[in-house]
Amino acid sequence: MMHDIYMEKPTQDYYDIWAAAGKHLGNISQGSIGWIKSDPTPPFLENLSFRLGNQIFFVRLEDVDNRIRIPGSIDGLFTIAEGYKSTACILPMKRIDSEWRPAISGWGLIDARTQIPFNPVDLVSEENIEMTQWELQDFAVQIVRNYLTDTGFEVMSYNSHPGVNPSIWFMKDDFPEWVIVNFGVFPQMEIEPSANLDEIKNSAGMVGCQGTLANVFVAAEAEMTNLTDSPIPLYRGHALSVRFEGLEPLG
């Protein structure tokens, strides 16, 4: 299935509030968080997201004085948080003179559903949480993004929604190309092409641009070299093994 996502262009005001919010979360966590979305580029299901221990938090920024527009929507925030089975948060910010600051103390986060402030550390536990389809897709997209960057290409945009294609746009020899990223979980080592591949290739904006496939295979650490009859579950925050053999051009 194809979905349309509004690729909203951020303003300088948004860059400023986004940078201040990211700096605040990095400081209050004392470097203990792992960023998931840590750039101010579209699409904007969330504005920032991070992992802390076995929990993931998706953050929508809010200007308490409603003087600037924040890209995205609360519906988008709930969509991605539900996909990850994680927490949707609001981070209210207030501009004082020329400086953006959290509007409430501590982490500054509010549960988007209950509207109650909370400390994300309180949600972290020792429980093993199995990765969702969204998490695995995001991991696969990250592998391909890193590959493209390391190869010298400029990644223009990306998304990790399992139902949205293409996953990545990048520049090659001054021309835009797109990538459909798929993932498979060991022992699966083949992925059938999408049934609507021709629809994707012929959709508006893609005609005339080279398309490629990227199949990323994931397993628990060392599982690919120590074959077992029963695959090991993939847990959030645990080490993974990856097999990725590059891009496959589409005719």
Image: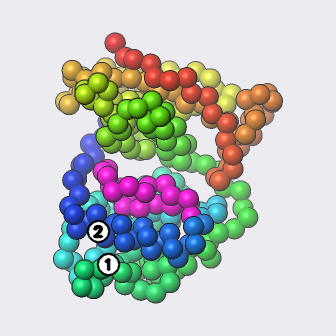
Which residue is disc 2 drawn over? 16
Q: Position of residue 132 (x, y in %)?
A: 57, 48
Q: Quadrant of residue 114?
A: bottom left
Q: Is residue 25 shown in magenta? A: no
Q: Position of residue 185 (x, y in %)?
A: 62, 33
Q: CA distance from mark 2 to mark 1?
A: 8 Å
- In the rendered picture of this protein, how many numbered marks are placed on residues? 2
Q: Residue at x 53, y 43 (%)?
A: 139
The residue nearer to you, when weighing 69 against 133, is 69
Q: Quadrant of residue 201?
A: top left
In this picture, which residue range is highlighted in magenta?
33-51
Point out which mark residue 100 bears.
1
Circle 1: residue type: Trp
Q: Is residue 41 shown in magenta? A: yes
Image quadrant containing the N terminus: top left
Circle 2: residue type: Asp
Task: Please report whichever mark, 2 or 1, sits nearer to the chain's N-terminal start.
Answer: 2
